[in-house]
């Protein structure tokens, strides 16, 4: 977590009060387990202790394995299933947040992680989940509740300090982007990219635009020009050689595309960088 985000999270913690609506519990899921709960009216913290499965959260689908965590929000639509040969064991806790006046808080995504979070430190995650479960069993004293709150915030901070897991749709788009960047000279077609991502052409086009803000073919061109800019600055290749190395058969077309995207002709960029 960056220093600024860490400070913001600490301020959010100091001005928020947490109420546990259920007892923190670790559930072993039976072999035939599936999950399709009604919409929640509160938050639900979910951490995978072991096993593997898939979870559909609203429009996105995520793989689950040890260390995968979620914070489900009020109104989320959920459907989960697991691998019967490697069943899930799940830590779960329903909670709500309020301010000092007791008014409910719906935090922004900046403070409560969204989607799936893959915690790298499995040992620490399991320790915190088991500690929360233990504290809820041994005592209902004010001190025990205070300790439970501290462990809860530690758990949220651990999740905030971890990268989000890409959705399955993002994984397909990422495969295509990595392939483009590995071979920008290739004559890419939308049909080929859609097949690589595992989608029909119309669905691929929609997903790619949603994820990158650009059509797939425009992304190919933009990446080629970005790579050309680096070669102009860092290599001794001629402009014609750079254009050919990136799949442009016509150096004049390359120059027009370069100026359209960067605002400068390639020769002017090179002379400007070297002056």
Image: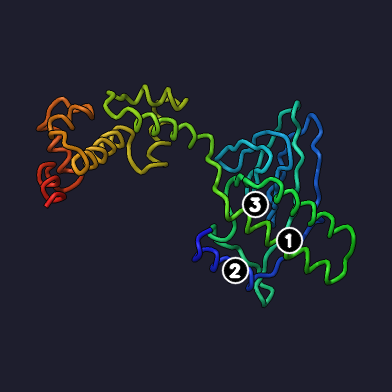
Work out which residue is located at the far bottom of the displayed protein and give it: 101
| Marker disc for residue 193 | none
Looking at the image, tell me whether mark 3 or mark 2 is earlier in sequence order.
2
Mark 3 surroundings: few (<14), some (14-19) or many (≥20) residues within 10 A: many
Disc 3 vs disc 2: which is toward the camera? 2
Which residue was labeled with disc 3? 71
With 227 as the anchor, is 154 left or right in this view?
Answer: right
User: What residue is at 71 percent from the left and 47 percent from the top?
Assistant: 123
With 181 as the anchor, is 146 left or right in this view?
Answer: right
Mark 1 surroundings: few (<14), some (14-19) or many (≥20) residues within 10 A: some
Q: What's the CA distance linking mark 3 and mark 2?
A: 18 Å
Q: In this view, does 88 lie above or below 92?
A: above
Indicate the position of residue 143 as horizontal and vertical percent values: 83, 71
Looking at the image, tell me whether mark 1 or mark 3 is earlier in sequence order.
3
Q: In this view, does 168 lie above or below 7?
A: above
Work out which residue is located at the far right of the displayed protein and give it: 138
Dividing the image into 4 quarters, which one contains the N terminus? bottom right
Helix, strand or loop at label 2? It is helix
Q: What's the CA distance linking mark 1 and mark 3?
A: 16 Å
Which residue was labeled with disc 1? 151
Which residue was labeled with disc 2? 10
Work out which residue is located at the far front of the displayed protein and give it: 236
């Amino acid at each position: 977590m960056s220093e600024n985000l860490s400070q913001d999270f600490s301020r959010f913690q100091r001005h928020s009060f947490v109420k546990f609506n259920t007892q923190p519990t670790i559930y072993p899921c039976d072999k035939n387990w599936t999950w399709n709960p009604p919409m929640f009216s509160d938050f639900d913290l979910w951490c995978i202790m072991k096993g593997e499965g898939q979870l559909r959260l609203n429009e996105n689908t995520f793989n689950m394995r040890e260390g995968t965590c979620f914070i489900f929000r009020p109104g989320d639509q959920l459907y989960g299933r697991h691998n019967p040969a490697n069943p899930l064991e799940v830590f779960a806790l329903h909670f709500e947040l309020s301010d000092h006046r007791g008014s409910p808080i719906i935090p922004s995504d900046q403070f409560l992680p969204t989607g799936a979070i893959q915690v790298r430190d499995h040992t620490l995650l399991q320790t915190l989940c088991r500690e929360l479960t233990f504290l809820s069993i041994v005592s209902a004293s004010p001190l025990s509740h205070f300790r439970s709150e501290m462990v809860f915030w530690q758990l949220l901070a651990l999740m905030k300090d971890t990268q989000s897991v890409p959705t399955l749709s993002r994984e397909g788009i990422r495969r295509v982007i990595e392939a483009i960047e590995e071979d920008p000279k290739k004559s890419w077609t939308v049909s080929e990219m859609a097949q690589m991502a595992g989608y029909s052409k119309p669905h691929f086009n929609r997903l790619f635009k949603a994820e990158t803000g650009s059509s797939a073919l425009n992304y190919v061109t933009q990446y080629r020009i970005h790579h050309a800019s680096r070669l102009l600055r860092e290599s001794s290749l001629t402009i014609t050689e750079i254009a050919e190395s990136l799949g442009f058969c016509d150096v004049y077309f390359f120059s027009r595309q370069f100026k359209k995207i960067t605002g400068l002709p390639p020769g002017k960029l090179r002379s400007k960088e070297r002056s």
